[in-house]
Amino acid sequence: MKKHNFNAGPSILPREVIEKTAQAVLDFNGSGLSVLEISHRSKDFEVVMNETVALFKELLNIPEGYSVLFLGGGASMQFCMIPFNLFEKKAAFLNTGVWANKAMKEAKGFGEVVEVASSKDANYTFIPKDYVIPTDADYFHITTNNTIYGTEILTDIDSPVPLIADMSSDIFSRPMDVSKYGLIYGGAQKNLAPAGLTFVIVKDELLGKVSRYIPTMLNYKTHIADGSMFNTPPVLPIYSALETLRLLKANGGLAEMEKRNIAKAELLYNAIDNSKIFVGTAAKEDRSRMNICFVMKPEYKELEADFQKFASERGMVGIKGHRSVGGFRASTYNALPIESVQALVDCMQEFEKLKA
Amino acid sequence: MKKHNFNAGPSILPREVIEKTAQAVLDFNGSGLSVLEISHRSKDFEVVMNETVALFKELLNIPEGYSVLFLGGGASMQFCMIPFNLFEKKAAFLNTGVWANKAMKEAKGFGEVVEVASSKDANYTFIPKDYVIPTDADYFHITTNNTIYGTEILTDIDSPVPLIADMSSDIFSRPMDVSKYGLIYGGAQKNLAPAGLTFVIVKDELLGKVSRYIPTMLNYKTHIADGSMFNTPPVLPIYSALETLRLLKANGGLAEMEKRNIAKAELLYNAIDNSKIFVGTAAKEDRSRMNICFVMKPEYKELEADFQKFASERGMVGIKGHRSVGGFRASTYNALPIESVQALVDCMQEFEKLKA
Ligand SMILES: Cc1ncc(COP(=O)(O)O)c(C=O)c1O
Ligand SMILES: Cc1ncc(COP(=O)(O)O)c(C=O)c1O
Ligand SMILES: [Mg+2]
Ligand SMILES: [Mg+2]
Ligand SMILES: [Mg+2]
Ligand SMILES: [Mg+2]
């Protein structure tokens, strides 16, 4: 049976990327060696690293004065690495969910944290819009896509202080204006690569200003100076990322990706909005294009387990909602074809016909 | 042409592991999904994680009271993570090379560092043996195998304070007594898995005793509490590690591995000792079984580039010595077959016949 992979992360990658990665595991570039056993200091890998950085810059249209880093440890490590490098006295946060909270929690170990606004009381079903960013903060931190709640900030906001964005689950999903940000980071395991790789895009001039001692590996300057090769980088995920980026470019870049993501999201949100039994959880104006969350209407609540089973039997993978929201979550990342969304919609409609 | 992979790391992996990994990239366990796109929270991956931890404990004969962790960031991240968790007032170090120095440098950010002995003046060609470990140190740190210089500590030493060992390049190469150590760590990219995975074996009772604030991701307790799943772990390298460990067990475990490693090392060291033109760089009693370093004798010095070329043309990969030692380094990790060592020896002898 064909599987439709709606996993929230690690998540679906383009089949071409998977096949190229498998080929490189067997034999990298016809070298007679596996990509798993080449030196990261080899000429062959240097080429991979350089092209990956170059495509990152090209596809995201990153201006001069920014560095692109590939690190290990996950996006979660950035929750403390950012304050190590940028927090002097005060940092401001927009609280839009679990990940924003985790970032805030780590920052509190470094000084004063200001929560400018929160949608916690509404279980993070919307993005707060009326807030004031303190102009004396060292930075303002947002989570552009809230993977768990299915809300997304789709514009590049203006901030009077350096804007830091966790884009773990929506990087490369739309064209964006990097110049509005001081630092963008994320785990690569959604729109880019297999698990084990973290990307950081940082404006160089922000660094080197805090007074604390920064451990070498936690200092962005270390990794900038050595082109993400201060120590052994995650070689395979970087290779897979390169193949993803090559494909992105060949397929028309981020403008085309945005078009496809809008089409996929509309297809599923329309089905939800026209359903008698399903209902979306996020405020309409803040709906995410990457993670689409829905539940059964109260009068059909007891059908949730049934639908889960019904959908699984038809090849749907990973549609269970996060335990803090319940219901269902379909992650519709770049690599997910619209055919998979259609398959889910068919499944929902078939179920509705049977049960409602 | 058959390649003989003497890379220092990332380095050769068993062909079976490479083939199983490639297969899992295409289709994991017949699930219809790639191992690159499964959720780390899925039942299937939970099984992988549990078996990997269990085999780690079984093969290394790890006693009760120790945790095994799989993290990202590389061994280099441990250079600061260890002091974050264990450094209160003072730490002691045996200085046996570049990696020991890097570990010491990070510890200095936390308090008093005592270098109990150093072989720096001899370019780290031996392991110092006459030293006193201060009994008031929080821990004593050693690098059991010095990847760059080809020296190795082959016994599990006694220490009056918790013994911390960087075993990046010799873990799983011999049976050992884990109970003598407080913490063992390393990058997995030599004897275990592809790059992107760091292992930590830690005695639980040592944790939770320092007074400082430890960022969540840098706290071993975080990862112990969540079985290395606090955040997304490096899924693919963990899967490859599992396949390596399964093979290790099927092949007779660490006792058999040690026998093979001794045989390989003897073969190459004998060739070096019996050569007119090559000479080993490490003190004989401290010779590593994992990284075998040799140079041209002074009177043949100008032949080094010739031999490098000669060997490359015969399929030898990665035998260039680290720039701080020069000459040649053949890394003879677990996965390297003795046939590759024999091929290198043949190559050396053929070259010697032609040139000397
Ligand atoms: C928005 C966001 N931030 C951070 C994380 C944590 O990433 P990691 O598991 O790489 O630490 C996630 C993971 O799902 C996420 O969705
Ligand atoms: C003994 C030793 N320690 C530490 C390291 C650093 O490991 P990583 O690159 O994973 O940070 C190495 C790498 O070669 C090593 O050989
Ligand atoms: Mg969230
Ligand atoms: Mg290295
Ligand atoms: Mg060394
Ligand atoms: Mg996750």
Image (tube, coloured by chain):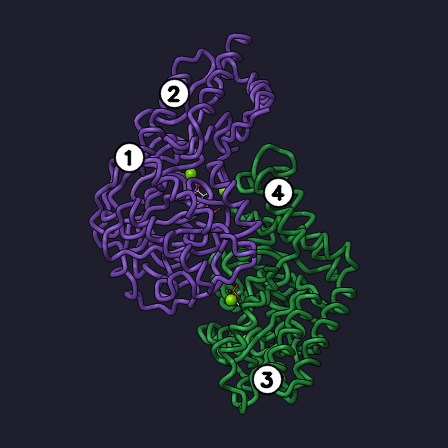
Chain colours: A purple, B green
Is residue A323 shown to the viewer in this render? yes
Sequence-first tag of 3 and 4: 4
- What secondary structure is marked by label 2? helix
Label 3: which secondary element: loop
Amino acid carrying label 4: it is Gln
As measured in the structure, the alpha-carbon distance from the residue carrying label 2 to the one carrying label 1 is 19 Å
Give the labeled residue for mark 4: B23
Report whether mark 2 lies on the same chain as mark 1.
yes
For mark 2, name the chain: A
Residue A315: where, in percent of width, then height?
A: 57, 24
- Quarter residue B71 falls in: bottom right
For mark 3, what is the residue? B281
Label 2 with label 1: CB-CB less than 8 Å: no
Q: Which residue is mark 1?
A: A255
Q: Write down the chain letter for disc 4.
A: B
Determine the image quadrant of residue A211: bottom left
